[in-house]
């Protein structure tokens, strides 16, 4: 067996200082894991971003408007809702890295086929198939991150994984925008299939299947990942008298005298069916708030990814290439927000604020709307773009604390299924976003511009101040972000009770297994 599959060792120390902690991943093993998990998310978001970048030429090729583009994204995402739960069950029971490898290869092949579509119906059918495949990413990555990242650093390390999601969207928009200008949209879309094959090979080469339950958590300086084939690590987990799960959140909550919510404690003797597992994770009060907030956040992001370039072209009177560059500049702000929020939440917890992840999540959701609204009202790009970068920083910051907080309140043996439930409900909202954004923009837009009528607008430049329909859509759908922030803020107490309950569930589960 290759040496990279051996037991992890600690050779380094915790990073010191804000800058060092922000930029240090903590050893080669962590570096491999973070880069590969980020690449999985990046490839998925690059594909979504590409549809937004190629919206105008696709509309022209198949004579469909904004509603047609919205239909592609909506149907593929909603199909993902149907396949997410079965994938969640598989993730909790099967080799997760092998599953990701297979999906990457199949997804790459289907992407090449989508670029060869001869009709809108064919393109829609391929995208629907791909939507079903992408449902594996959420449950698999959440489960792997929970098993590999220590709880006290999980927010910071997970934030780097989420950088891949935003960087992938920027990559997809920029590359496909350039290639569509040099060649055509078919070449641009097909080109995204090539990285999928490289990713499948890298997953096979550098990411073995880790042990479940915490025995594979990577300390600072870890060189390799403990795996299911590592007998020493496996015996250490099986012989442990207490669960490996340990986090600063649970320790602080117990010091504060927080008692577990009985509804969130699962007896170790219980063998749950799929639907029993679904009902259980939905009975965890703070998890419900986190699912709701996550869905609202992704709903808003999805609408922006699909229609931001069209908005820039209409609102600021720029061409497609310039609109792509503006999107990438704004996406850089979102990447900064992702990195900062995970670190900020971990530091709050380190300073005794046990609900730090919920606090950071609430602030960033509300901050997104407060900054985004005035930016959307401006008609001058020079004034609007800097403010939009700040808004994007808040928007990017919402995910790391929310995503890692979910792992705190759910027992590890249910992470895959819990993430599948969250992903399914999130995708239901996310899938509706492009269609609803398209419908609102069509209702309030100016039909003679051609942007909503399937007319070739690749070289059209509108006078600054147009794009009223998309402006209304962006403003209207930013309001639920405030509601999501409020839900997180008022669920702080439930979060602590549920984190203690998750630890109690694992104690019972381990006791029943031994």
Image (cartoon, rainbow, N blue to C red):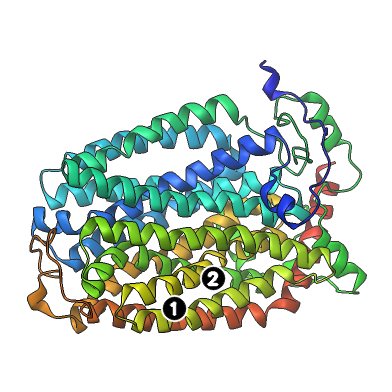
Which residue is the site of mark 2? Answer: 394
> Up-down: is 238 above or below 66?
above
Which structural element holds mark 2? helix
Is there any visible trace of residue 458 in the rendered image?
Answer: yes
State the image coordinates of residue 256 (x, y, percent, origin top left): 90, 74
- Position of 113 with respect to 32 (left or right) is left
Which structural element holds mark 1? helix
State the image coordinates of residue 127 (x, y, percent, origin top left): 27, 49
- Position of 89 with respect to 178 (left or right) is right
Is label 1 in contact with label 2 (beta carbons under 8 Å)? Answer: yes
- Quarter holding the N terminus? top right
| C-alpha gap between disc 1 and disc 2 | 9 Å
- Residue shown at the point (57%, 56%) measured from the top left: 419
Which residue is the site of mark 1? Answer: 372
Please state the total of marks drawn on the protein image.
2
Q: Residues within 10 Å of mark 2 (few under 14, many from 20)?
A: many
Is there any visible trace of residue 75 in the rendered image?
Answer: no
């Amino acid at each position: 067996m290759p040496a990279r599959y051996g037991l992890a060792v600690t050779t380094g120390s915790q990073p010191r200082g804000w800058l060092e902690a922000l930029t240090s991943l903590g050893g080669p093993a962590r570096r491999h894991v973070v880069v590969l998990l980020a690449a999985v998310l990046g490839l998925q978001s690059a594909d979504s971003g590409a549809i937004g970048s190629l919206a105008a030429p696709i509309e022209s090729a198949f004579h469909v408007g904004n509603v047609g583009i919205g239909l592609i994204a909506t149907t593929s995402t909603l199909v993902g809702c149907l396949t997410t739960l079965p994938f969640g069950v598989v993730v909790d029971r099967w080799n997760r890295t092998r599953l990701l490898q297979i999906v990457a290869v199949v997804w790459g092949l289907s992407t090449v086929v989508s670029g060869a579509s001869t009709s809108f119906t064919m393109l829609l059918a391929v995208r629907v198939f791909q939507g079903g495949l992408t449902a594996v990413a959420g449950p698999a990555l959440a489960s792997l991150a929970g098993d590999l990242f220590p709880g006290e650093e999980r927010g910071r390390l997970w934030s780097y994984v989420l950088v891949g999601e935003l960087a992938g969207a920027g990559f997809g928009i920029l590359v496909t925008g350039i290639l569509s200008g040099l060649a055509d949209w078919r070449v641009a879309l097909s080109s995204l299939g090539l990285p999928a094959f490289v990713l499948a090979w890298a997953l096979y080469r550098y990411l073995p299947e880790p042990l479940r339950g915490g025995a594979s958590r990577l300390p600072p300086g870890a060189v390799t990942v403990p795996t299911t084939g590592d007998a020493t690590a496996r015996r250490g987990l099986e012989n442990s008298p207490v669960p490996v799960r340990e986090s600063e959140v649970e320790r602080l909550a117990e010091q504060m005298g927080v008692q577990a919510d009985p509804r969130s404690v699962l007896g170790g003797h219980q063998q749950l069916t799929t639907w029993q597992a679904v009902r259980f994770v939905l009975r965890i009060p703070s998890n419900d708030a986190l699912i709701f907030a996550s869905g609202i956040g992704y709903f808003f992001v999805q609408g922006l990814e699909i229609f931001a370039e069209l908005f820039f072209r209409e609102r600021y009177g720029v061409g497609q290439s310039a609109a792509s560059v503006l999107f990438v500049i704004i996406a850089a702000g979102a990447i900064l927000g992702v990195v900062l929020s995970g670190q900020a939440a971990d530091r709050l917890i380190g300073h005794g604020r046990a609900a730090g992840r919920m606090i950071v999540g609430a602030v960033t959701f509300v901050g997104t709307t407060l900054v985004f609204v005035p930016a959307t009202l401006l008609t001058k790009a020079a004034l609007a773009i800097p403010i939009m970068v700040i808004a994007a920083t808040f928007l990017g910051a919402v995910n790391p604390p929310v995503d890692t907080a979910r792992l705190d309140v759910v027992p590890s043996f249910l992470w895959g299924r819990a993430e599948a439930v969250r992903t399914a409900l999130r995708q239901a909202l996310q899938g509706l976003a492009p269609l609803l954004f398209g419908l609102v923009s069509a209702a309030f837009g100016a039909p003679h511009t051609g942007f909503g009528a399937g007319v070739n607008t690749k070289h059209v430049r509108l006078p600054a101040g147009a794009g009223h329909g998309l402006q209304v859509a962006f403003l209207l759908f930013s309001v639920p972000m405030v509601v999501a922030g409020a839900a997180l803020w008022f669920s702080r107490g439930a979060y602590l009770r549920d984190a203690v309950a998750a630890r109690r569930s694992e104690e019972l589960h381990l006791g029943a297994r031994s």
